[in-house]
Image (spheres, coloured by chain):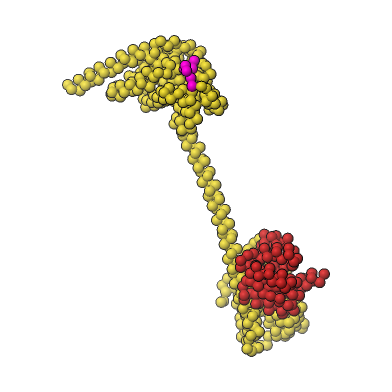
Chain colours: A red, B yellow
Amino acid sequence: MRVLIVEDDVIIAMHLAMLVAEFGHEVVARVGSAAEAVTQAMALGPDVALMDIRLDGGSGIDVARELHERQALRCIFLSANLDEPTRAALLPYDPIEFVGKPVVPVVLQRALRKAEGLTEL
Amino acid sequence: MQGTFLMTLSAARQTALQREVASRFGLVPNFFASAPDAPEIIERLWDFAKAAYLDNPIPSLFKERLFVYLSRFCEVRYCIVRHCAFLVGRGHSSGDPTVAAQSVGQAIKLLKTAPPWERDANNILSGLEKLPELKEWSEPDSESEDWLIAAATMVFVEPRRADRARRALRNALGGNRYEHLLGLLAFIRTAHYWTVLHPELVLEEDALELLKVNEQLARLLLEDPEAARCDMGVRLFEELTELRGLHEKRELEKAKHALEVQLQQKDLLLKEVNHRVKNSLQIVTSILHLQVPHAQSGEAADALRNAAARVLAIAAVHERLYTGDDATVVRLDTFLADLCQEIGRAYGCPDGIKSDVERVDVPTDMAIPLALIVNELVTNAVKHVGPPCEVVLRAERGRALKLTITDTGQGPPEGESRAGLGTRIVDAFSTQLGASVEPKQAASGFSVELTVPLHAPDKTCGS
């Protein structure tokens, strides 16, 4: 799978990229802002986005809406705050999975497998 | 000598005053015989009475009827009885001998007129507002007289709330007559207050006799509920109470709102702190994980992997926190299952660790030691014996947790078992949890069995 990583903390983004590669997927780009996320998604057409909900200069929720509307791109959402209102707000954009931070790698692996299953359909 | 002379002078002044009073009213009301120690005060009071009441250009009968009606709103009954007596011909109404006496029936009708706050105030005032300026003063018992008395009552009893009544009166009467009316109201208020200050004032014989022969009138005059209820002081008090009630309610609302805002802020702050703690733990685990491939030796890589795993075990507890309803407990089943799977993944045996964990919630300060113990024992088993490894956790009648970790090996070799950090971590946290640790060797393999009390764990940890 071709994965876009949207995470504004560089260290975390590097770690996520390492894990995604370890799980056998291709990281198409690592971006740190909402605007970049939209541009890169349009340019690179990834299969799935690994989306941090709290981003520099905007909410991952807004990015998710835009990606969903423009490209029907679905996300695995990452956040340190996955309360009910947050989950409910993301429901309209067909989330593949919610992965809590700190990320337990195996949980991310499961989410990517689920995404793979969905993109193969 | 001098004292007697002064007394004589004072008595003379009093006599002169009383003669003048009698010439106007046809009798001397006790009101003007009060305060004998300071006749000069009564002289001024009499001057005020003449200016605002007796010589006031408003028609005498209206003045007297208004005096009677407004005296309903005075707790001391002297004025109402005295002026009612004037009205029905015992003495002269407004000191004017040309005024024809009203009948007791007319007086009763006036007294029975409901106060304006029990009537449609809007109707009264709009009636006055629509009136062209009166050329002649209203006839007694006419509709416009009723409106004038009602509006004057509003101004008299509740001056601060009677702006519209004041405007309506000025509209109907014109400026000059309006000011004379206010002058009369001021004198009536003064008269009432004077009787309140002089409780020794008694009714005159003629007034007492009037009450004696007219029982209905007497009852109306002496048992008027408005006397107490509509006394200026009482009304003011009621108003203040109402205002205070309103104020307190507003303050209460304000305090409630502030509390809600504070709670919301606290909630937001807590969320923010949690977010930061989790994010920081994420960064710590990320750094450790990122460093592993850069290690110069196998030993260094192993040490980094161990550190990363320990930090992850703690971080994973935090990941579970504050996502459910209760921020102080962690649900163990999914949590330990993920942790075991992660260890398997990290050591290249993704299906090598089986976990069978009962669904049980434990407090956070129990979850972290448990996570670290499981991490050490499972990692140790996978590293030194290899898969498969089994983790079982049972809640024993809600009193203790029984955690068993089994591998297929022979247990740690004698002697060196006490040395590793992993073992020290297990010992220290077991002590902290008040848990007993039992190693068991069977033919099928080696197991460690921990029994952790669920309540009142022994906090005297060895660390």
Q: Where B384 sits versus A96, above or below?
A: below
Inspect this view and state whether residue B290 appears.
yes
The residue depicted at 66 percent of the width and 60 percent of the height is B325
The residue depicted at 28 percent of the width and 23 percent of the height is B40
Please tell me which residue lies in front, A77 or B365: A77
Q: Position of residue B346 (x, y in %)?
A: 70, 80
Please tell me which residue lies in front, B119 or A66: A66
Q: Does the magenta stretch mainly form a helix, a strand or a loop?
A: loop
Please tell me which residue lies in front, B87 or B329: B87
The residue depicted at 57 percent of the width and 56 percent of the height is B263
Q: Position of residue A111 (x, y in %)?
A: 74, 71
Please tell me which residue lies in front, A47 or B5: A47
Inspect this view and state whether residue B451 appears.
no
Q: Residue furthest right?
A: A121
Q: Residue furthest bottom?
A: B297
Residue B58's quadrant in the figure? top left
The residue depicted at 65 percent of the width and 68 percent of the height is A35
Q: Which residues are magenta?
A: B133-139
Q: Position of residue B43 (x, y in %)?
A: 30, 21
Q: Where B5 sits versus B250, above or below?
A: above
Q: Is residue B99 left or right of residue A28?
A: left
Quadrant where the C terminus of chain B is found in the figure: bottom right
- Residue A90 in magenta stretch: no
Residue B92's quadrant in the figure? top left
Q: Is residue B456 left or right of residue B238?
A: right
Q: Position of residue B83 (x, y in %)?
A: 42, 17
Q: Where B304 sits versus B403, above or below?
A: below
